[in-house]
Amino acid sequence: MNLKKWGFFALAVGISMLAAIYRWGDSAHSIGQIAVSGGGARHAAFLTTGWDRYNLIATGTVIPPFQGDVKVVLEGKPEMDYEIFASGPVIDLKLRRLPKFRDNTLFDLHPMDRLALWVLMRPPVLDPVCGMSRRDHFIQHSHHGNTYHFCSQKCLQIFLSNPEEYRTRDFVTGKYTLGLYDVKSGKRVANYPIVFGGSEQDANKHHQ
């Protein structure tokens, strides 16, 4: 291995060690299983509110006898933009087979395969009064240096009547799910719960 490759390897190890020590509020790691009976995660991934993007690393093992193709979907309301990538090892020593991933689908999973998915989520900007996702016709309004978006004059007037009540409600909160579905049967074979929530201090980061 040449010096350049050793440098990349050392950087990857350093980042991994840092991530193990400190968990950023906009990222989380969830471990689960893929099973015919409907696998699950060890615990929900918790993400603090107020960020414009989030990252989830979802890892899992295929439990026998499941075998087949799996579609990966982010589920929840309001809908958000997301991208899913399959992650491989920094250095592939060919010790394990890596399932192919295309169009949010894992192909030809075998029992005891291990997978790692990186999910990049971009939550929508919300009307802080009614919770509707921002659209082209929304009204913009600035308050104490922060910009808010409203679906109508009615929501804007409600906001103006008590801005402090609504000033941190323009971001996503609540429960989402990263669901894995068997392409052949349509049944869910894994479920990774994701919870967007946090304290007001966390939320205030959104408007700093």
Image: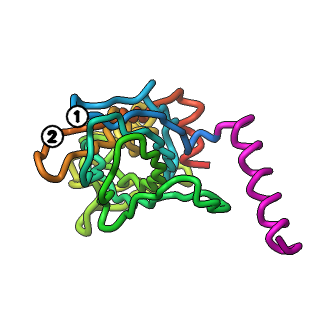
Percent x, y of residue 157:
28, 45
Q: Main secondary structure of the magenta part?
A: helix
Q: Are marks 1 and 2 in contact (CB under 8 Å)?
A: yes
In the displayed structure image, the side of residue 121 where residue 185 appears, left or right: left
Secondary structure under tag 1 reads loop
The residue nearer to you, when weighing 163 against 4, is: 4
> Is there any visible trace of residue 127 in the rendered image?
yes
Percent x, y of residue 30:
48, 36
The residue nearer to you, when weighing 47 against 61, is: 61
Magenta stretch in the rendered image: 1-23
Quadrant assignment for the N terminus: bottom right
> Is there any visible trace of residue 131 in the rendered image?
no
N-terminal-most mark, 1 or 2: 1
Amino acid type, label 1? Val
Which residue matches tag 2?
Answer: 187
In the image, is residue 135 part of the stretch drawn in magenta? no
Which residue matches tag 1?
Answer: 36
